[in-house]
Image (spheres, rainbow, N blue to C red):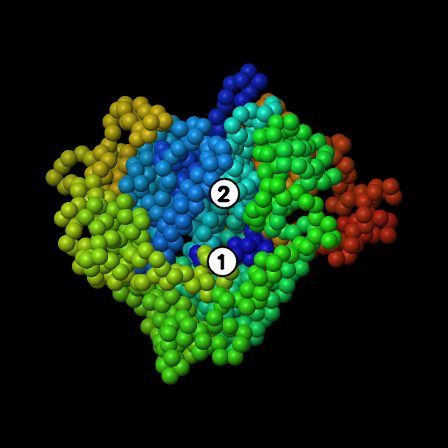
Amino acid sequence: MGVPAFFRWLTKKYPSIIVNCIEDNPSTDAQGVYHPLDETRPNPNGIEFDNLYLDMNGIIHPCTHPEDRPPPKNEDEMMILIFECIDRLFSIVRPRKLLYMAIDGVAPRAKMNQQRSRRFRASKETVDKAEQMEKIKNEIRTNGGLLPEDKNQQEKSEHFDSNCITPGTPFMSKLAECLRYYIRHRMNTNPAWRSIKIILSDANVPGEGEHKIMDYIRRQRAQPNHDPNTHHVLCGADADLIMLGLATHEPYFTIIREEFKPNKPRPCDICGQLGHDMKECQGIAKEKFGKHDELIAAKNYDETRYIFVRLSILREYLYRDLETHYQLPFQWDLERAIDDWVFMCFFVGNDFLPHLPSLEIRENAIDRLIRIYKDNVPKFKGYLTENGIPNMECVEIILTSIGKMEDEIFMKRHESDQQQRQRERNRSYNNQPPNKRLRVTGERNGPVALPVWMSAPQLEPQPIGQRPNSYINNPAQANIQLRQMQRVDFSSDNRPRKRPYNEVEPETPDTPLLDKQDSINDEEEDNDPNDTVRLWEEGWRERYYKNKFNVTKDDLEAFRIQVAQNYARGLCWVLQYYYQGVPAWDWYFPYHYAPFASDFLQVRNVSVFFDKTTKPFKPLEQLMAVFPSQSRKFLPIEWQSLMIEKESPIIDFYPLNFCVDLNGKRYEWQGVALLPFVDEKRLHRTLDHVYSTLTQEEQIRNKRDYDRLYIHSSNLLYDYFKELYVPGENQVTRKTPLDMPTMLSGGMAGQIWPDDDDKIKPIGELIKPPLLNCEDIINNQVICVKYRDLSFDDDYIFKAKLLENVTMPSATLKPRDYDQMTPYQPNLGFAQRPQYQRDFATAHRFIRHSMGGQQSYQQEEQQQQQPGGYYPQRQPDRYYSQQQSGGGYPQRQSDGGYSQRQSSEDYPQRQSGGFFPPRQPNSGFRPRQPDGGYRPRQPDSGYRPRQPDGGYRPRQPDGGFRPRQPDSYYSQRHQNPYNSYRPNY
């Protein structure tokens, strides 16, 4: 979702929601025998999950055009990378019931406007970058440099246009075919895949991927056989997934996403090496100099790490933040308050509306909204929202309250910007400027004189250009190393400024550090030429509407009310989209800019209902609506001409040049692309004349499709599915589908019919792969049918509440957790581990790194390394069904497929923080006394006295600890404020 810095803000405010994912790895024993990972064993994270949902576009984009490593050479490599990514996610989560893969299909019109802006920008950046790269390559060759494609012709590859990741393109058609093969292969070869059901919703199924997943969850919850204690895991990096997860009101909901690492080094787009950007590339080395030069080609990229975002913990935080102490005219309910919080988050940004000028996430806009909300809640007759329908009278109160603060907000923002610019100018006078390269001394063809702190020997060999203390007699190699050293960058954004390679004069107090250009830039920043509105000066409203909407002062009053009412209706559309599904496929906000909060004076009577009978675009129609003419190669031949011919009735939809309004921002990506809105009716009238030219393959790419459901022959549903393909008088079709038997499906409901494009494969039939590097499926035992979610009437309202008979997770947060405002730092798994174990894991990681990553701990009885630390190997017959203090999940029921604990003797190592390994005699921990306390510390113990504000019990005069009292929150939960709302469930 379009909320910059939302996740960073969320993890800083609520740090305990994050835990690291713990992964198992395949092993090789002492005899060199490879042992693959057994994913049927209990999850190493100490919790078992039921359903895994993959928002596939969050996987497809980083696999096809990664930012932190060179891109794959062809589409086949991209498909393999996608397979590997899914394999890894499956291994981490290990779903026991369902795997749902959802690719973005045709989006609602409100989303298509954002997609259009992104694709036009991406195309423009691609053209500009290609021209720049070609110019730099020519300069490198002119100077005698060598490029990867010059050294190895196989390195040369055609540029990948990421715009092809859009429904209706040949690439998406190939991806769907490859995923169908991939699912069959894994279900035939991996035991962990055989026991689950798999749904594939490809790009021909309308709807955004994450919203297709949410629609599935909503409809399953609405049927009586749904298990209210289902554990859901949703994979995706978009911030809106957190809001979507909360909107389901499923208490066991977890997000898995990549761990964000700021300032991650990016390889050069020309040579693929780290340490410099494209503008400073000098090519690759022509010949070998020294025994370690081969490391220049080594791609030592950091492996992506994954984290869990526990929404059950976020619910605890929100209870504390949203609870009001006022006397309310209605009963306070956490579920309704969470819905209101989700709605208020839309005010600071989303994918469908421009954000309000006075609300910025970096300025704690959400906290400000919560304060206003809690102050005004006693005045409301109810909550801000109900089942996805907002109370517009309350919305007007909230927004106009923000409007009263706008003058102050704009003034403080301007002051903050001025202070930030002053700090940046001050930093430019330091001896180590943040955005400038290190200056080194030495002659052009001589050795490089380095600072004293870089003269120590390195722990391991470095690639060319990163070895700082080597004397090289070869002049050419010395030049390469010198150029690399000039690119050393100690700044946070890793964007060095180019400097001539022969500039080697040292910096001294007499050397001016701020050149003329820097002074000019400072003056330009003070003047801020990109901001013509100047919101901090009087008359900002008139200037804003004049510059952004071209509205005169005489028409201003009526126009701003009109824009505010359209925006308010947009807020209604977004909220219903999150809670009920698509309200209307054709609605969109018809302006590029948002109104001010103080303009929402007459919105209480705005209609909150939409026409649900509207239909989505077809895939090729959406391509015509969102593609620039530079990406027309993905369209049919006759359709391409409509984008470039001057006589085309829709030629104005495809401008070659367009304006990007920075709107007071610093960077172009933050600006507003001023593209014309597509006239839907005119587009359809024009396309009606070229539909007859489509080939059969293009017609298949353009049709609307349905989900596919896969099961293994060992599944209880297999015989039932197989009967669908037996010819007979009452043949099952899409118009006459069968209801899926929930007794056989484990509670999953829906309608099914035969897959016309994927007939059942007889046992033993060979299935050829769509990719050259993949193996044949020799003994197919997988069947596929078309699947459709449960159908409901258009006026049906999905209830936004907890389901009956749900067992709520136990409270995890302690009183001290609510006061944390610490930087984001993931915890070590769902079950907390003691500090000495973390230190032990750190030591082992350091040793393994120094040994070059050798695996020396392979015996079964030895400890296995996990990303979160070291702990003993779990036994095959142990299942983890009880609550862990780090995750707060209840005991599984007897029909859940997981064994219950028999007695406390089965787990002698269980401590209050989770499962710990047996303490060793030399661990330094003293045994507890019979009364539950600790043995008094000795005078020479060396431990610091604990402080009164550290959250620990005061010491006794004899130096020991006071025994725990019966009313401790470890023994009775009533002291945890989160439990006070239990009676409301």
Residue position marked by numbered label 1 in the rendering:
667
Residue lying at the far bottom of the rendered structure: 554
Residue 278, numbered circle: 2
Mark 2 and mark 1 in contact (Cβ < 8 Å)? Answer: no
* Horizontal and vertical percent position of residue 805: 44, 53
* Horizontal and vertical percent position of residue 572: 37, 67
- Please give the name of the residue rendered at 29% of the width and 51% of the height, measured from the top-left corner: 629
Residue type at tag 2 = Met
* Horizontal and vertical percent position of residue 418: 60, 67
- Please give the name of the residue rendered at 24% of the width and 58% of the height, measured from the top-left corner: 651
- Please give the name of the residue rendered at 68% of the width and 40% of the height, measured from the top-left corner: 441
**Res 52 quadrant in image:** top left
Residue 95, numbered circle: none
User: Residue 317: in sight, yes or no?
Assistant: no
- Secondary structure beneath label 2: helix
Q: CA distance from mark 1 to mark 2?
A: 19 Å
535 lies above or below 3: below
- Please give the name of the residue rendered at 77% of the width and 42% of the height, measured from the top-left corner: 929
Of residues 421 and 936, the one drawn nearer to the viewer in this rendering: 421
**Res 64 quadrant in image:** top left
User: Residue 285: in sight, yes or no?
Assistant: yes
Query: Nearer the viewer's eye, disc 1 or disc 2?
Result: 2
